[in-house]
Image (cartoon, helix red, strand yellow):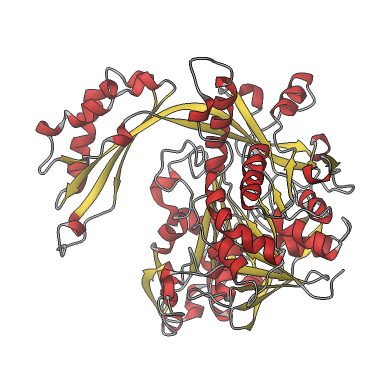
Amino acid sequence: MSSRPVRIAGASGSASDRRHAIAEFARNYPQDPVDVIIADFMSEANMVVAAGRRVDQTQTQGKPSTDATDIPPGYELSFLLALQPALEDLAKHRIKLAVNAGNTDTQGLYDAVTQMIRAKGLDLKVAWVSGDEVLSTVKTALSSGKSNFKNIYTNEVLSDWSFEPIFAQCYLGGLGIAAALAEGADIVLCGRVSDASPVIGAAYWYHQWRRSDLDQLANAFVAGHLIECSNYACGGNYTGFKELEHVGKDGWSNIGYPIAEISAEGRVVITMQSYATGGTVTVDTCSSQLLYEIQGPWYFNSDVTAILNGIHFEQVGVNRVALHGVRSAPPPPTTKVGITARGGFQAEASWFLVGLDIDAKARMLEAQIRHLLAPYSSKYTSLEFSTLGSVPDNPKDQNSATVTFRVIVQARNAEDIAPNRFLRHITDNIMQGYPGATFHLDLRQGFPKPIFEYYVTLLPQEDIKHRVHLPFKDNKVLDIPAPPKTTTYPSHQPSQALTTTPITHPDFGQTTPGPLGWLIHARSGDKGPDANCGFWVRHSDEYAWLRSLLSTEKITELLGPGYNSNAELAIERCELPNLRAVHFLFRNLLDRGVSSTTTVDFLGKNVAEFLRARWVDLPVRFLNRGRL
């Protein structure tokens, strides 16, 4: 066991992150060494698309009239772009790398990576992790009656789902990664391990922890959550972003990447690249990332449960924030499973409305389009119209006076929304349109594209064949057992609709109307059809006002009629007092989730920004400290 903390770098937060960070961390090792680089390439969005690619490849293999090589692989090609320029420095400095870029074809990614390494003549040992593909396991348990696989979001049972599953992936923990590193692997490739699992695995390996070291595991788990989204811990997607504009040489144009330092005892400090030219690590940037995508005070992983009620951060230096107050509990006996099905097809088109009478123009256009589509709409599963934006009084220019009118359609079959049954009628409406009628000339989105449905349920960890493949050790395979001790938790997190002993507004002195976001930070994200949103304030005396103001009743009011018209919406609320935060889970806010929703905010990231723009009575003495 090393006496110093392990330094773990977060180099990617999604398949669409910038590509340079793995190479940058490796190249700068002499001045800012790291022991392990982790990179997250998976999300619910690319999981389902990759599942479709994997199934398409399997179905076309061996057919003379098709070529499976025309279909992109199930792994993430963007990882190869990030890895290629880093390989020499990874080998030179013996830096470990653990990623989940295998997506739905980890073995295929192994083949591609080892080919790259051989071409460069490097000495790097590559392992890969399997066990996340569980469709056959789910089908067997369903047919035998062992489980009905209830959807954790909708309570529907799998046999009642109106879609045919084509792929299923469960979320693995980090101990397979730890085992691979312990066997001498330099690069560990994974599919659907949880986002934080590479950090858990790296710390477990480095410090030679045991499965019973739950406190250490819980802190590593939270550290993994803090750096899994790369720049988010350093000022990306942060409501205090304006303070970053002039921080460092590049300001907000080139935000740096985070590093987690984790001691053998589980103490955590979050920092960033010493050579970064933009971004910052503060209590607020860490609070922002912590509140992103959690579901409440219980935070689950296959290896441990982190209890967040007492969590807080401490600024211990420039770009150095210490984590405190995390408690641990055993992991649940189950892990999350995402089941993919082909959901049909989608197409959309846009018009531009300008100037006065926007509502009337939108009503006219919608009525005309509905009339034109009436002969075909019985085959649609969804037809939605929305007006995006609004025109200010006395607009300063034509662009600021322009809003977008969006028409989106879905159907089970592509031919039901083919151009002659959707797009042509959208454009044919031009001559009878509203004043200034103009549609978007880029019509590519008007052609049918496939969409996927995503069903989320639970699978016992003991039913999973979590394995580590070590080709560099004569194809040795290690089995990773399920956790020996687990705890079953209620299906819903603790919820408190109203704070204890709320304080009335007169106690805060004079108030003035204004948007929440003048005083309150917020951060939101998606999990399936649910969205979460955490709010926090900068000063301790403002927290009594925040927790008193943001009750479930008040947040329902602020969500407004657009969201409250959803009969499936349910709200859970908890307080994290040491963060000066109030957290909400909005169940079923996002339609059916990122892969099939018709909403513009398909990732739920702008729920927070909408709510921060809503007006409430703000205490003047707090505003006098300065607006966000």
Of 8 and 25, the residue lying toward us = 25
Towards the viewer: 115 or 402: 115
Residue drawn at point x = 81 percent, y = 64 percent: 206
Residue 185 position within the rendered picture, expressed as x and y whole percent measured from the top left: 77, 53
Q: Residue at x 65, y 22 (%)?
A: 159
Q: Position of residue 488 (x, y in %)?
A: 81, 45
Asked whether 159 or 623 is in front, the reply is 159
Residue 187 location, x and y as percent? 70, 53
Q: Is residue 247 above or below residue 19?
A: below
In the rendered image, the vertical position of residue 408 relative to residue 507, given as above or below: above
Task: Answer with left or right where residue 465 lies relative to residue 535.
Answer: right
266 vs 108, left or right, is right
Determine whether 568 is above or below 295 in the image: above
Note whether residue 383 is visible.
Answer: no
Number of labels in the image equals: 0
Quadrant of the image for the C terminus?
bottom left
Q: Residue at x 49, y 79 (%)?
A: 508
Quarter of the figure with the N terminus: bottom right
Looking at the image, which is closer to me, 318 or 503?
318
Determine whether 59 is above or below 468 in the image. Answer: above
Residue at left 28%, top 26%?
Answer: 422
Occupied quadrant, residue 614 = bottom left
Q: Quadrant of residue 386?
A: top left
The quarter holding residue 137 reads top right
Residue 243 place in picture, x, y as percent:
44, 77
